[in-house]
Image (cartoon, rainbow, N blue to C red):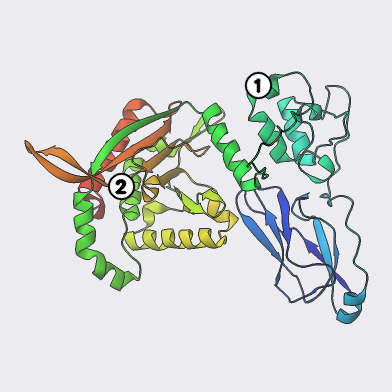
Amino acid sequence: MATEILVPTLGESVSTATVARWLKKVGEAVKADEPLVELETDKVTVEVNAPSAGVVEAISANEGAEVTPGTLLGSITVGGVAAARNAAPAPAAAAPAEPQVETPRAVSGPVGVPGSSSGHAPLPAAAKMLADAGVSADQVGAGTAKDGRISKGDVLDFLARPAAAASAPAAAKAPRALGDGEERVKMTRLRRTIANRLKEAQNTAAMLTTFNEVDMGAAMALRAEYRDAFEKKHGVKLGFMSFFVKACVAALREYPAVNAEIDGEDVVYKHHVHMGIAVGGPNGLVVPVLRNAETLGFADIEKAIGGFGKRARDGQLKLEELSGGSFTVTNGGIYGSLMSTPILNPPQSGILGMHKIQDRPMAVGGKVEIRPMMYLALSYDHRIVDGKEAVSFLVRVKEGIEDPRRLMLDL
């Protein structure tokens, strides 16, 4: 009896994935719940486990194929291990299995789904995007999916190039010849998504950045005084990120536009703070979300952030942990950055950039003192956040860090 291997539900706002790597070959025995294949989505890599013990009978979606939830990836023969192992491997599928949705037909005119005369048929999700953008498949050219088909990522890549999108239909530009000492490596799906989202933020939002600096002395002294007791009681180290999360939560309560988003002609205000925490992973930057941060204490925040970092390094972040953020904090200081202008994470309207703590001479009470200082940067969408609100928000964060007792007393 054969058991089908299907693409699982991928999570909120994620409708497609790419078959990144098969961990088992046809004829190999597998145990129940043993990882079979890795799928790469726009956000994370997802492992699909064996639904039952047996032997891999067939692979229906080869590496590189674009798939959707419910798509058939392959099958497992339950029982008959020896016979299945000795059987000839099933031939590779001619094309990845498609979801149970009728594929839009190619047309030659401008009505309906933009057609293709060159054979680069778009996948269903890509066809809809092409139709919405009024772009033909010929303009995009050869895709990265199976048999040169155009994927959603290919359309996003094309639309990120305004000059190309506005040009007359033409074949895709041929890659340039490599010189000595050069190597061409295809961008991963995650890297392409990061590039597209960053470009989307620049093209869509009226992005502006305001700066301030904060004296870290009081926070450092408080941390040093209670560090051992905090770790003994809560089993986690007291870091600076929890101070900044608490300071941002307090500031967002006073300036809710920084925590809001634009939806068409409306502004959506949020009565919660789902704080995105930028974390560096092996494949790039990801932003897991600390949900309802306004309800969390210092220990809860530190435990959650520590868990994010570990799962990001191990590639075990779940899709639901990466969606729904309302504001983001990123800390370039851990890499030595002294100052930067962070880019918004759409559809959010604000992102706070932390930086390296550096001793600098400061005027304090009419005297020059050496103080541990950090530059702060707030990038915001000027369409929804006024300059006064942005500056006031950053000042409020500064005040919270320079007098952390205010954060503990919720003042």
- Horizontally, residue 399 falls left or right of residue 203, namely left
Spatial CA distance of label 2 from label 1 is 42 Å
Instruction: Name the residue carrying label 2.
Output: 247
In this view, the residue in front, 39 or 332, is: 332
- Horizontally, residue 338 falls left or right of residue 102, namely left
Instruction: Name the residue carrying label 1.
Output: 163
Q: Earlier in the sequence, mark 2 or mark 1?
A: 1
Kindly tell me whether residue 13 is visible in this rendering: no
Q: Identify whether 220 is placed above or below 111.
A: below
For marks 2 and 1, give the one nearer the viewer: 1
- Say which quarter of the image contains residue 105: top right
| Residue located at (22% from left, 64% from top) | 226
In this view, the residue in front, 179 or 247, is: 179
Residue 281 on image: x %, y %: 52, 54
Residue 221 on image: x %, y %: 19, 56
| Residue located at (48% from left, 63% from top) | 310
